[in-house]
Image: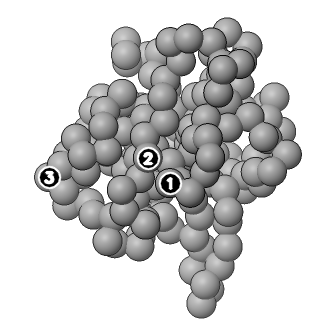
Amino acid sequence: MSSLAPGLPRPVIQEEPTGCGIASVAAILGKTYAEMRTQAHALGISAADESLWSDTQYVRRMLSNAGVATAADECPFLSWNALPDLALLAIKHHQTEGRNFWHWVVFQRIADQAFVLDSASYLPCNVRQDFEAMQPEWFIEVQLAQQGL
């Protein structure tokens, strides 16, 4: 997307149908999908486990393992302006047989420019600013600044 400033983080495309959590963490950490998948497997985390997109502990554990803090709780989405500068967002929220599922994306604000890194391989552009098309349910704040990353 040419309107984005140069040097902004780039999205990581998920290589597995349920790999959005792995791809989102990879984007935050500046890793490739393959690198993050290897690290996830070392932690016992696999995209084949559908819990990766129905439980927050997996993305939290991958980030924590890299020394990155996350907020203790999920916060309800109120508005795009109310989001912290870096967050994991749960979009496409739905329930199947009483179990919650969602698609992980990364919200980032740099120099007052907001965008979403979406790992879905079918998108024409994975750096999104079509905020009205996304309907976040809640978010987890990611605290990179405290970690010196």
- Label 3, on which residue? 42
- Callout 3: 10 Å neighbours few (<14), some, many (20+)? few
- Label 1, on which residue? 121
Q: Position of residue 82 (x, y in %)?
A: 79, 31
Residue at 40% from the left image edge and 58% from the top image edge? 19
Residue at 44% from the left image edge and 16% from the top image edge? 146
Q: How far apart are the two marked residues, 2 and 1, measured between alpha carbons?
A: 6 Å
Residue at 24% from the left image edge and 46% from the top image edge? 34
Tag 3: amino acid: Ala
Tag 1: amino acid: Ser
Looking at marks 1 and 3 on the same chain, the residue that comes earlier in the sequence is marked by: 3
Residue 31 can be seen, yes or no: yes
Does residue 123 sit above or below 12 in this rendering?
A: below
Q: Position of residue 74 (x, y in %)?
A: 61, 49
Does residue 33 sit above or below 2 in this rendering?
A: below
Does residue 29 sit above or below 65 in this rendering?
A: above
Tag 2: amino acid: Ile
Of residues 90 and 113, the one drawn nearer to the viewer in this rendering:
113
Q: Secondary structure at mark 1?
A: loop
